Amino acid sequence: MTAPPATDRVTLGSDPIGAELADWGKVVIIETRGRVTGASVTAAVGYVQQDDDSLLVAASDDRTNWARNLSVDPRVRVTREGRSLAYRATVLEGDERNDAITALILTYGTPAERLGAGPAFRLDPLEE
């Protein structure tokens, strides 16, 4: 299975606000491969960029589909500010997970406080 294909502009159909926020760099659009269907699936997700260009993301629930997809296939395409790149997700645990959750809450404020019940990931850029 290959990483989701590159797209010129990701649209979220029912989430035009998420697409606009990604264009502004406030969130990223992650494109995963569906764990059951194999179809490309997109979601707008809050992130924190690290000094090494990796991104930290987290789900607010264990049942979040994009996170469940990443747990099966860690390859993901991330679109932000009109640019789309391939990444590989790594599940974070322990202190790394807690630090990622804290950074996301500090970045996004109160709405992000639901984070912590679902998995957290580091997305490392891949060479294309």
Image (tube, helix red, strand yellow):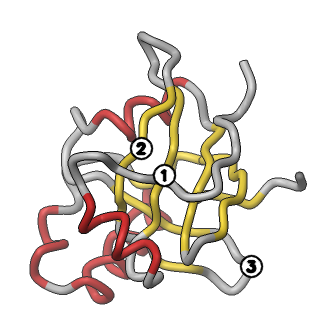
**Residue type marked 2:** Thr
**Residue occupying the point 29% across, 52% down:** 59
State yes or no: discs 3 and 1 in contact (Cβ < 8 Å).
no
Mark 1 neighbour class, 10 Å CA radius: few under 14, some 14 to 19, many 20 or more: many
Q: Residue at x 24, y 68 (%)?
A: 17
Q: Which amino acid, mark 3?
A: Asp
Is 108 located above or below residue 101 in the figure? below
Q: Are marks 1 and 2 in contact (CB under 8 Å)?
A: yes
Circle 1 — which element?
strand
Q: Is residue 114 above or below residue 61?
A: below
Mark 3–mark 1 distance (CA, rounded to whole Å): 19 Å
Amino acid at dot 1: Ile
Circle 2 sits in a helix, a strand or a loop, which is it?
Answer: strand
Residue 30, numbered label: 1
Q: Mark 3 or mark 1, which has the lower sequence index?
A: 1
Proximity of marks 3 and 2: CB atoms separated by less than 8 Å: no
Residue 62 percent coordinates (x, y): 24, 37
**Residue plotted at (33% across, 70% down):** 101
Q: Quadrant of residue 66?
A: top left
Q: Nearer the viewer, residue 53 or 15?
A: 15
Mark carried by residue 52: 3
SS under mark 3: loop
Q: Residue furthest right?
A: 127
Query: Residue 47's image quarter?
Result: bottom left
Residue 49 at x, y percent in the picture: 56, 79
Q: Quadrant of residue 36?
A: top left
Residue assigned mark 2: 42
Disc nearer the start of the sequence (3/2): 2
The CA distance from mark 1 to mark 2 is: 6 Å
Within-10-Å neighbours for mark 2: few <14, some 14–19, many 20+: many
Mark 3: few/some/many CA within 10 Å (<14, 14-19, 20+): few
